[in-house]
Image: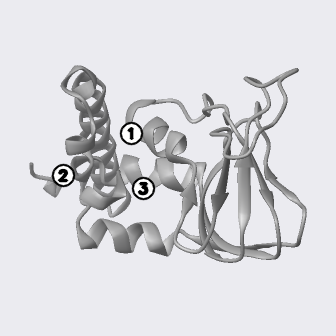
Amino acid sequence: MLENLNEKMLKVICEHLKPVIYIEDKYIIKEGKPLGMTLFITQGIAWTYTVSNNVGAETSCGSSSNKWLKRGDYYGEELLKWAFKCPSYYDLPISTRTVMSQEKVEAFALRASDLKSIVSNYWWHFTREVPQVELEQWEKSAASSIQAAWRSRLARARHSNGWDKFTV
């Protein structure tokens, strides 16, 4: 999803990245819990796995339920999809996998609240990422943004005692 964004939007996203460090053998994200961040690995190795589909099953070499994350990889695409289509801050997606550090992991985290703020403030840059059927929600977001800007402009005009001079 990020590969289609222009350089300006990638810079805006980078301004919101927070550096994080996880020591060896620590849970980073747990399966079944709300996914509150997208994680971009810069150093170290983490692994993701799921247990919900393999309860009672024996593990085997090359199982598709395990995946290594290394430098340049990221986890949390569900959060990106959520930010592009869900209007609520409260309905975070649920992680479908557990992410655990295998060794010391250095990464950048993009928090859900920051991502939602970016999408809200720059919604027009993200409309290409949204299927046609979901554009109605974006139209509502656009209308809300315009209304908020209008209210802000009115408030500034009232505050500056220039209400009688206010023009549209």
Residue 102 is situated, as x and y percent measured from the top left of the image, at 82, 65
Q: Which corner quadrant of the image does residue 109 belong to?
A: bottom right
User: CA separation, marks 2 and 3?
Assistant: 35 Å
Mark 2: secondary structure: helix
Mark 1: secondary structure: helix
Q: Which residue is mark 3?
A: 118
Of residues 92 and 159, which is closer to you in this image? 92
Of residues 162 and 76, which is closer to you in this image? 76
User: CA separation, marks 1 and 2?
Assistant: 41 Å
Q: Are marks 1 and 2 in contact (CB under 8 Å)?
A: no
- Residue 63 is marked as none
Q: Which residue is mark 1?
A: 84
> Crowdedness of circle 2 by 10 Å Cα count: few (<14), some, many (20+)?
few
**Which residue is farthest left?**
168
Q: Earlier in the sequence, mark 1 or mark 2?
A: 1
**Residue type at tag 1:** Phe
Which numbered mark, 1 or 3, is in the foreground of this view? 1
User: CA separation, marks 1 and 3?
Assistant: 10 Å
Q: Which residue is mark 2?
A: 164
Q: Are marks 2 and 3 in contact (CB under 8 Å)?
A: no
Name the residue at 10% across, 52% down.
167
**Residue type at tag 3:** Ile
Which numbered mark, 1 or 2, is in the foreground of this view? 1
Q: Which corner quadrant of the image does residue 137 belong to?
A: top left
> Crowdedness of circle 3 by 10 Å Cα count: few (<14), some, many (20+)?
some
